[in-house]
Image (spheres, rainbow, N blue to C red):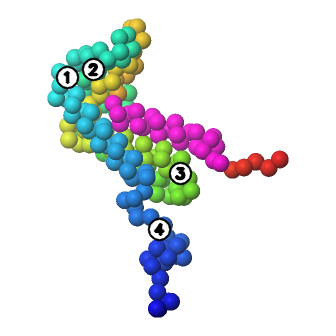
Amino acid sequence: MDETRTTSQDQGATSGAPTAPLIGRLEIWIAVAIVLLDQVTKAVVRARVPLHDDVEVIRGMLGITYVRNSGAAFGLFNTIDFPFKSAVIAVVAAVALVAIAAYAARLAPAQKMARVGLAFILGGAVGNLVDRIALGYVVDFVDAYWRSYHFWAFNVADSAITTGVVVMVLDMLGLGSHASKTV
């Protein structure tokens, strides 16, 4: 037997490189699952719910209302028209996505909570960017309301982004760390 032979896993461990392949990382799978769930739900809504129609899910609280958001988050710039609006918003969204991905790539592997939060944000951002590029608008359909007050319509991607931000804030507050305290 040749005792000088090492496996690629041994070499990765000694060189300081991560041993897990990129595709096997949890955060990649989370982001992909969010994009897929987002696109499937939007396709179902586009196919089954007429534009601006309401389908009551929970009386007095939750409905499905198919709307098109040609603006930014929370319908910002939705009613404003300017040349190449959808292209400009898509480019801004793509630049933000690249910045988030660059930040995520710089996180240490031990920062698991932050990495998961960013995976949610990236998955949601990609889901909405797919709509902007393919359709020129984002499909929103979740209508949460109480009596006559309606929250902005949103979708799975928006929910993932919000969840990711909450996870990131919790991580920043130290709720994701398991450091033992000395007495």
Under tag 3, what secondary structure?
A: helix
Q: Give the spatial CA distance, label 1 vs label 2.
A: 8 Å
Amino acid type at circle 2 is Thr
Q: Position of residue 4 (x, y in %)?
A: 50, 89
Q: Amino acid at mark 4?
A: Thr
Please name the residue shown 19% across and 22% down the image: 49
| Residue sitting farthest toward the top | 147
Q: Earlier in the sequence, mark 4 or mark 1?
A: 4
Look at the numbered disc 4 and give the secondary structure of its residue: loop
Mark 2 vs 3, N-terminal side: 2
Report helix, strand or loop for mark 1. Answer: loop
Residue identified by numbered label 3: 112
User: Is 28 covered by the magenta stretch?
Assistant: no
Numbered mark located on residue 49 in the image = 1
Identified at 29% across, 43% down, the residue is 36
Occupied quadrant, residue 120: top left
What span is colored magenta in the figure? Answer: 155-178
Q: Is residue 177 magenta?
A: yes
Label 4, label 1: how far apart the Cα atoms are: 46 Å
**Which residue is labeled 2 in the image?**
65
Residue 143 pos. (x, y %): 34, 20
Q: Nearer the viewer, residue 125 or 89?
A: 125
**Does residue 80 appear in the picture of this structure?**
no
Task: Identify the mark nearer the N-term, 4 or 2.
Answer: 4
Question: How many neighbours does mark 4 have within 10 angstroms: few (below 14), some (14-19), or many (20 or more)?
Answer: some
Marks 1 and 3 sit apart, C-alpha to C-alpha, by 39 Å
The kind of residue on which mark 1 rests is Val
Residue 19: assigned label: 4
Label 1 with label 3: CB-CB less than 8 Å: no
- Asked whether residue 134 is in view, the answer is yes
Q: Nearer the viewer, mark 4 or mark 2?
A: 4
Please indicate whether residue 119 sits to the left or right of residue 174 in the image: left
